[in-house]
Image (spheres, helix red, strand yellow):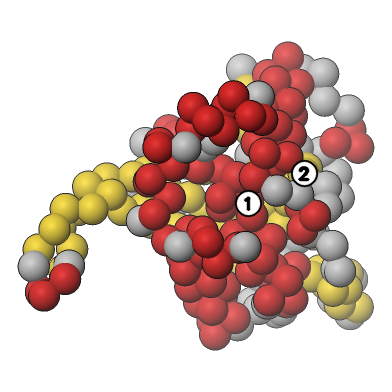
């Protein structure tokens, strides 16, 4: 994927923005775009009756701490660029590890992203964080043989992603469309421009 090419930009990005360029900002930004494209994934069902479709994207990002996993919220991701996202993830991650997050920083997310790959997971089904309707699971990157140009076999870094979702609101078509949208953006981040 072109996301792997981020290494050629990481030093310039750090110098310009004061933040490291990681994978998470690309997946957060791709998710924000996909959530706007497929609104049912960015919605909630209250009391099994009322469906609320959000016109903003607040993404909870799972952070490992000495006391367990927490999910602080990145607010209004649809308005953020990569640098904003990386800085906010770093800030929230530090606060999470230091135990200084406020309750309001953990509440109100419309969607969650969990990266089990940092713990070696190759594939899993993350659990939806109610009242959200879905969660994206990112998994470990491994080199795998794939068919390349002219039917050649090439080695490429591959990551599985998974979407766990509330089937009352999201059907398989929307779920797969959402995942394909993220894949397309991560493989060609220029689509965000």
Q: Position of residue 87 (x, y in %)?
A: 70, 32
Q: Which residue is mark 2?
A: 74
Q: Position of residue 137 (x, y in %)?
A: 52, 53
Q: Is residue 157 left or right of residue 155?
A: right
Query: Looking at the rendering, which quadrant does residue 56 occupy?
Result: bottom right
Please tell me which of labels 1 and 2 falls first in the chain: 1
The one of 68 and 86 positioned closer to us in this rendering: 86
**Which secondary structure lies at badge 1?**
helix
Q: Is residue 174 above or below residue 129?
A: below
Res 28 seen here = yes
| Label pair 1/2, CB-CB below 8 angstroms | yes
Q: Which residue is mark 1?
A: 28
Q: Position of residue 145 (x, y in %)?
A: 15, 57
Q: Quadrant of the N terminus?
A: bottom left
Query: Looking at the rendering, which quadrant does residue 62 occupy?
Result: top right
Query: Looking at the rendering, which quadrant does residue 121 occupy?
Result: top left
């Amino acid at each position: 994927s072109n996301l792997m090419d981020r290494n050629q930009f990481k030093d310039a990005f750090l110098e310009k923005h004061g933040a490291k360029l990681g994978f998470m900002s690309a997946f957060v930004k791709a998710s924000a775009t996909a959530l706007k494209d497929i609104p049912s994934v960015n919605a909630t069902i209250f009391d099994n009756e009322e469906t609320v479709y959000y016109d903003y994207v607040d993404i909870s990002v799972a952070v490992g701490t000495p006391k367990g996993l927490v999910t602080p919220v990145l607010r209004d991701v649809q308005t953020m660029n990569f640098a904003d996202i990386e800085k906010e993830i770093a800030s929230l991650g530090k606060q999470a590890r230091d135990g200084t997050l406020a309750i309001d920083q953990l509440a109100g997310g419309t969607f969650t992203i969990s990266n089990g790959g940092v713990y070696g997971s190759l594939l899993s089904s993350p659990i939806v964080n109610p009242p959200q309707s879905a969660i994206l699971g990112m998994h470990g990157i491994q080199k795998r043989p794939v068919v390349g140009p002219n039917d050649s076999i090439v080695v490429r870094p591959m990551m599985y992603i998974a979407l766990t979702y509330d089937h009352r609101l999201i059907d398989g078509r929307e779920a797969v469309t959402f995942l394909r949208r993220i894949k397309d953006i991560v493989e060609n981040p220029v689509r965000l421009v």
